Amino acid sequence: MTTRRIRGSAVTAALAAAVTACSAPSGGGSGDGRSAGSVVLGVASEPATLSPLLGYGKDGNSKIFDGLLARDADLKLKPALAAELPKITDGGRTYTYTLREGVEFSDGEPLTAADVVYTYRTVLDAKTNNTFKSELDAVKEVRASGDDQVVFTLAYPYAPFAARTVLPIVPEHIAGEQDPNTGSFNTEPVGTGPYVLSNWSKGEKLTFKANPRYWGGEPAVKTFTMAVIGDDDVRATRLRSGDLDGAVLPPNLAATFEDDDAKRTYEARSYDFRAVTLPTSGKVTGDRAIRRALDAAVDREAMVGKILDGAGRPAYGPLPVDDPAFTEDVERTKDLAGAGKILDEAGWKPGKDGIRAKDGQRAAFDLLYPSGDKVRQDHALAYASDAKKAGIDVKVESATWEVIEPRMKDTAVLAGFGSTGDPDFGLYTLLHSSLAGDGFNNMARYDNPAVDRALDDGRRSQDPKARRAAYDKIQRALVRDPGYTFLTHIDHLYVLADRWDGLSTQLEPHEHGFASGPWWNIEDWQPKK
């Protein structure tokens, strides 16, 4: 984690009218008037559900729940609901966890092994509507051994399995009485974590209060509110007015706080990348030559410099350049001549307007990005500009996710992905053909048998060299047969009022702002003296 003053261009005029229309979250006012134990944070989005059975908090950092294990600031695994790290036997096929003594759910009921078994069995149940079952593909059986031990039996040795057990545990005595897909638990959760949900106004805010029964000790921050503000400019302006104590911001807006001595900017490195999905069903995006030409035509370095103000790195694939499994010789620079050659050889010929065509089909397609997201907008516009230089016409269009989701099966999207912890965590759901079109998994509907085999090899092998070789094959295949145009890996930026100690950031996944950021450990914050 670093804190820094960020250099950058000035932002266009703030949205004063929008700010006037915004009301302060409950418990708020100005930063100076807010109680010492209260924090209001501005985030870009909210979860669809607060149930871990449907995916909430599955990668850790849920403030309502705990997993068997958790991660520290350096992402090292540490015990949480488990008293210690698991005992691994049978050649990596059996993991045994012993539960921490004296843990209670926030309603006062004790945590038992039966709750853990219920959680995992329900997550893996085909009737449960989540899209992360494949992440627990290795689990053959989970059973209780008494009240305080849980035994996982794996179908095959899965090297990073322990990291999957940060999945939050839910109470069987409540969730087990409901339909996991539609029950009230999805919006009225009960967990063992440091906070309990006290209010959720959909689309506006979520408010949490300290859990007096928390096994780790009651937090100093007694209440915190996540204000849901989709528009980057509005989020920045509300932070500037004192309506918010902190916010996640894009680089150009974070830069406007560089002279504010009452605030600090935190920068978190991440696995979060921006990429364009290129659906294989599209008449244009389904052509491999088009996809290869776009990969060659984009200027990744310019995007990092101009859009991210240097707060990021070029993305040559789903793994960042500093990941141990990154294949260094897949790095590539903008090559318009190469893009033109690829298209010429494939029969895409320039028309009078400069846009190429083949068999009467113009090299043109739509590109959607979520409205209010300035970083994605700028990536989309830069991508379209680079594509046009290669003779490909990309029409950029903003839309809400409600509009994007039904169209993304056959329309390109400026998307964000990225998972920390192990290459399998991000690559399998992004690329494996068995997950094509499964929610936001494999949005491009990518289908490459060689990549599927390498993904399976990487998942099932315990030999580090064999796993490295599998992920090397995948990265090279994505150059020859790209299903996405990878653009940049983004550093996440947060600006907060400087009135608390204990703030830090982790290496972050794509999902950020709500569970990540300097508030990933808000239960450990202490007021400045």
Image (cartoon, helix red, strand yellow):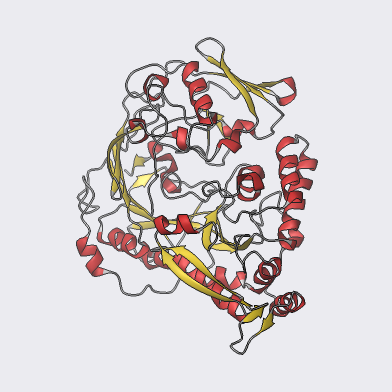
Q: Residue at x 65, y 35 (%)?
A: 160
Q: Seen in the image, is 142 located left or right of residue 111?
A: right
Q: Of all residues shown, which one is farthest toward the front?
A: 360
Q: Position of residue 243 (x, y in %)?
A: 25, 55
Q: Position of residue 407 (x, y in %)?
A: 48, 59
The total number of labels drawn is: 0
Observer-nearest of 491 and 139: 139
The part of the image, by quadrant, that contains residue 402 is: bottom left
Q: Seen in the image, is 255 located left or right of residue 448?
A: left
Observer-nearest of 142 and 233: 142
Q: Seen in the image, is 118 located left or right of residue 41?
A: right
Q: Seen in the image, is 194 located left or right of residue 428?
A: left
Q: Position of residue 163 (x, y in %)?
A: 59, 34
Inspect this view and state whether residue 309 appears: no
Which image quarter holds the C terminus?
top left
Q: Position of residue 477 (x, y in %)?
A: 75, 57
Taking 100 as reference, is 162 above or below it?
below
The part of the image, by quadrant, that contains residue 420 is: top right
Q: Residue at x 38, y 63 (%)?
A: 372
Inspect this view and state whether residue 374 appears: yes
